[in-house]
Image: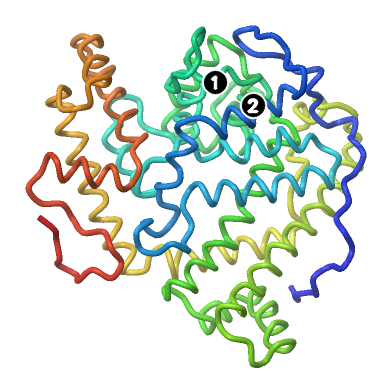
């Protein structure tokens, strides 16, 4: 696929579409609350997410690099803000509720562990005897149980629409015949989702709203584009390597032709901004086509449709796949990052085993909760998992240093065998 020049036409908001989620018609909150005189229910959800503790902790949770490697690399927080901007742009162009789309984008990473996907993989392995670990299920636990801010309920008491989007933004969890969707076929649905669904039915066999689908698409756009940005700036990949991806070579060639003497830092930004624009404009065009062909006339029609209505064209989806494959092979498996991931895994394993054996070593609030959990090993393991999953990278390192004589060094620039006392 050939790159194209950035569009000069403004991305004007479309009128609210009939298939958009309507805050006035929301299915409501688990615990009834008085309406706000100045904000819609979806605006309140977004604001509660921004102000919650778990959202603030994203500032010190790794996207790809560890935070203290440099001030300009992305964290889970900056990534979430960027996803929110893209989701809002998509929603406005498609006539969707941009507050709901933004709320879902901002909340989508709340359940992530310290140390990126390494933390999630290790916790999932450690929790295998106790139901496993899944970051989407953990996000649901956070917003329905673990956040303790309000006088009359645990969690954030978000609307049904936000909760369903948080759980199903990547598609239904159950098939129409009741069987588990393919991505959960081997392990089954996470316990946290099943437990909450028994309290408030999230219609797990239906698709989520178009707003949730837009948020999921925005995550993919931001993830690929910004990992290329961070990888180039961090020296893990270079322009010669990305030139091996046809789609990226076309965009890079356009930048080089327009600005032959451009300094590298500006060339990187020009590449990334064009990449994001191409994906957004393709998603808007393709989603409008799908929505028109489908004939959906309500948000319930969107939920009942058996294929996603917000997505990329076949050509752009293929380009996205090629970028993902490139990043996996050339960046995520880079020896310097693998070394960090291995060391981060040691920290997670050590903390889990120590707290499971000696829960009194956790902070007082968590130690009291462990004492109340009785002798049930599964309940204790889930409590320890909640505590570790909520840690920032820096706090996990600090806790390891408090409890162990040696803590692995996680800097990219650290020597191969270096450890700190």
State the mark number for residue 156: 1
Report the front residue among 348 and 333: 348
Density class for disc 2 (Cα within 10 Å; few <14, some 14-19, many ≥20) is many
- Whether residue 75 is situated above or below residue 7 in the rendered picture: above
Q: Are marks 2 and 1 in contact (CB under 8 Å)?
A: yes
Q: Residue at x 86, y 40 (%)?
A: 95
Which quadrant of the structure image shows residue 6?
bottom right
- State how the image is colored: rainbow
Report the front residue among 243 and 396: 396
Which percent across, then down, holds residue 249? 64, 80
State the mark number for residue 45: 2
Name the quarter where the N terminus is drawn.
bottom right
How far apart in space, not on screen, are marks 2 and 1 (Cα)? Answer: 8 Å
Q: Earlier in the sequence, mark 2 or mark 1?
A: 2
Which percent across, then down, holds residue 258? 74, 87
- Whether residue 301 is situated above or below residue 214 in the rendered picture: above
Which percent across, then down, holds residue 58? 45, 43
Q: Residue at x 59, y 75 (%)?
A: 268
Report the front residue among 24 and 282: 24
Which quadrant of the structure image shows residue 181?
top right
- Relative placement, left or right, of 21 versus 132 is right
- Whether residue 410 is situated above or below residue 358 in the rendered picture: below
């Amino acid at each position: 696929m050939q790159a194209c020049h950035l569009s000069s036409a403004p991305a004007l908001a479309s009128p609210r579409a009939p298939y958009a989620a309507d805050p006035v018609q929301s299915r409501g909150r688990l615990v009834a609350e008085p309406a706000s005189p100045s904000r819609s229910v979806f605006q309140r959800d977004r604001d509660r997410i921004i102000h919650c503790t778990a959202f603030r902790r994203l500032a010190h949770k790794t996207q790809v690099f560890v935070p203290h490697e440099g001030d300009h690399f992305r964290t889970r927080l900056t990534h979430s803000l960027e996803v929110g901007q893209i989701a809002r742009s998509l929603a406005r162009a498609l006539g969707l509720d941009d507050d709901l789309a933004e709320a879902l984008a901002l909340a989508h990473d709340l359940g992530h562990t310290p140390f990126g996907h390494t933390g999630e993989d290790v916790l999932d392995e450690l929790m295998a005897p106790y139901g496993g670990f899944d970051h989407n299920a953990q996000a649901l636990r956070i917003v329905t149980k673990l956040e303790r801010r309000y006088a009359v309920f645990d969690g954030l008491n978000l609307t049904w629409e936000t909760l369903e989007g948080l759980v199903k933004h990547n598609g239904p969890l159950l098939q129409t015949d009741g069987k588990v969707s393919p991505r959960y076929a081997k392990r089954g649905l996470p316990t946290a989702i099943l437990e909450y669904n028994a309290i408030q039915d999230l219609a797990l066999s239906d698709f989520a709203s178009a707003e949730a689908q837009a948020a999921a698409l925005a995550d993919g756009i931001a993830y690929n584009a910004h990992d290329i940005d961070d990888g180039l700036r961090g020296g893990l990949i270079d322009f010669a390597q990305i030139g091996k991806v046809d789609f990226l070579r076309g965009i890079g060639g356009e930048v080089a032709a327009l600005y032959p003497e451009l300094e590298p830092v500006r060339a990187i930004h020009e590449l990334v901004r064009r990449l994001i624009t191409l994906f957004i404009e393709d998603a808007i065009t393709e989603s409008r086509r799908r929505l028109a062909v489908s004939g959906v006339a309500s948000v319930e029609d969107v939920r009942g449709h058996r294929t996603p209505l917000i997505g990329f064209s076949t050509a752009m989806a293929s380009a996205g796949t090629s970028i993902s494959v490139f990043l996996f092979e050339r960046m995520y498996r880079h020896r310097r990052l693998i070394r960090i991931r291995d060391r981060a895994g040691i920290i997670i394993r050590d903390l889990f085993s120590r707290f499971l054996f000696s829960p009194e070593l956790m902070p007082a609030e968590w130690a009291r909760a462990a004492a109340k959990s009785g002798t049930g090993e599964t309940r204790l393991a889930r409590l320890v998992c909640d505590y570790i999953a909520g840690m920032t990278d820096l706090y996990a390192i600090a806790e390891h240093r408090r409890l162990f004589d040696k803590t692995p060094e996680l800097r990219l620039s650290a020597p191969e065998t270096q450890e700190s006392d």
